[in-house]
Image: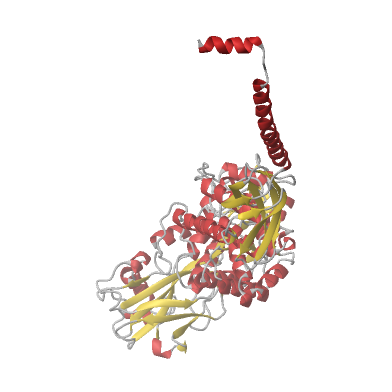
Amino acid sequence: MRATKTRGVPLRQHWISEGNFPRSWRASSFLKRPFWSSSTPSFPLILLVALVLLVPGQLMFGTSRASASQLPSVVIDNVPNYILLGTASKIEFHVQSDAGQAGQSVLFLVYPKITSRSGFDQIRAHGSFGYPLIIAPSTPLGQLAASGSSYQLPIQIDSSQGTGSTPVLPSCATGCQGVYPLAIRVINTTTGNVVSQTTVPIIILETPNAHPLNVVPVVEIAPTTAPSVLSQFVSFLASTPQMSLTVAPYGQAVASLTSSRRYQGAIGQLTGWAKQPNHQIIATTFSPVTPECALSGSVPGSFQDQLTSTRQLLGRSAIAQSGLTYYFSGKPTKKGIELISRLGFAAAILPPSSYPPGLPLTLVTPLIDRRAKLSELVADPGIASDLSLSGDASVASEVAVADLGQVYFDAPNSASPRSVTTLLTIDNSSSLAIAEAFLSRVESTPLLSSKSAQQALTAFSASTDKESEVSAQTRNSSCPSTTPVANASRLIRAFSSVQPPKAILGRLNQQLLVAEGSELPTSDSSDLISSIRSTIASQLNAINVVQGGALTLTSKTANIPISLVSQLKYPLSLVVHIHSDKLTLPRGSSKLTRIQQSSVTVSFSASTKALGTFPMSVTLSTPSGLLLKTTELEIRSTSFSLVGIVLTGGSLLVLIVWWIRSPSKRRKAELAAAGDGSPAAETGGVGQDE
């Protein structure tokens, strides 16, 4: 269980601590005689000696001069939920000792009744019990019945003097019912020295009560709870159908059941349990998050995605009746409360850290946030502290039930509905044992009646009493950077567009939801995001373009084949895009392709613009547009285009015509020059000779 401070009072384990007494502290031999017996002639003397020599309650927890390993210590194993006056009960305990247990006796003591819950807290903090009302006769340890390694000490108390030697609780004229400190003391049989003592609070009743205190247990299933532990708790729920209870399971813990064949049936048991009207599963996120710090919208990693993921794991019908109640794992912020109100939640369960300052020590009515129109049940910090007192489930649960009993006795038989919300966190086998022990004790204690959160809120709505018109204590919003989570969310969305198997996509999404958790260390969150990136990269990098020799085009218009190979065992969709300045692509340059097998060929219709060899780029991307990789292929064109043929043919024709006509023109010019006899020609020639 999570350690908790109680209303500013440091937690000190006085209820269950044991005190080892120095041997110089002697209890006189009158301890063997009934302290309450007024028929004893020496009673006044005994009373005086008791007042002088008996060790006050606060000394029980003093430090012995001898080490704890050298002296015996009393360890309580099991305590009854309550003691009914005139009825026999028993307490089970064992004695830890390195020196053996020979020559030791045991007795019980009852200290004055605790008058208020504030007094209960004072005793829990400081351990001052006063002087005992009852000192029972001592019994040698060897004469007690044993159960395994535990002794069973009979406990019976009367409210009036009878004919026997049963201890009598004095001052019962105004009523004996209440919570009393009860101590188990081990003494040296020969000397009467007090060796060790352990004290627990216990409820003492005269008759069962008709107007019990409502207890609203809320069980938080921590995100890291092992499947075996959660399965055991579900079995416990199935075995106690009469118990009213509210369960707040994080999706991460529920997901661990789905991944284990051995425990998959527990989900069906849990959803079946929730169909009963006194059973409630309230809305939780996949992992603990600060609502306003999560991504907005409905993208992977958003607050709505956190809620939806848990609903999908449990089934919407399991939380339909309680879908309007939200569980805050940590102290909420004003923005967080406003956000869940906008999402349609009408009520919220708040942790002990949200207990409002300035209110009574015990909150027995819901709080109302008028601005957010939200009813709030705040878990009691005192009960949370009680449950964290000891690793022993029996003792911790008994102290918590006695604390609730004190709440009852602060206003016994109240006509107005009074409810105390208690939070139990299950994260391992030890916390499971404490939760089961506490719930079982609540169910079997006449002063207490279990209620679900919905039942408690309904009771107050129908009551004429007004709820406290204040909100629980909130804190200012302080959100870390969401950039890494947002980037991973976009990557998952892009990967989802290739239509991978739902199992792979689901695991990635769950990793993102965990990485967003407000209680997760930054380094762990970074590791999860890195894992998301590497997983997606490994999947997409398994698709490649086949590269070989140059692709040869021998005709003006041809199909260009692009071969893809896949190392994946599942199909996916990709977009293939080609580009070259030397190609015309009349039917488009991009194609959406479903890769069903280990290899596939995508063909593009193309026309060449030039002869020779030139590059062509091939790009693979997701349907959402995320670029995966670009590969360059070589194209060799050996065909002419129509324009090229016309131009080439025209040039050749001009060349041929010119070649044919050029000799003819030369011969004609020579003949013309030789046969020309004009005077000008002759004169010119002569004149030149001269």
Instruction: Give residue 166's position: percent from left, percent from top.
Output: 50, 80
Residue at 62% x, 77% y is 262
Give whichever of 517, 497 is nearer the camera.
497
Judging from the image, the colouring scheme is secondary structure
Q: Is residue 534 left or right of residue 213?
A: left
Taking 101 as reference, is 258 left or right? right
Residue in view at x 56 percent, y 11 percent: 686
* Count of labels in the image: 0
- Give residue 354's position: percent from left, percent from top: 54, 50
Say which of 81 and 57 sits in front. Answer: 81
In the picture, measured across the screen, residue 464 lies left or right of residue 111, that is: right
User: Which of the two residues, 46 or 571, is positioned nearer the viewer here?
Assistant: 571
Q: Is residue 1 above or below residue 491?
A: below
From the top left corner, tell me how far across and down residue 361 is, in percent.
52, 52
User: Is any atom of residue 122 visible in this view?
Assistant: yes
Q: Compared with residue 590, is residue 177 higher up or lower down, i.e. above or below?
A: below
Residue at (60% x, 66% y) in the render: 567
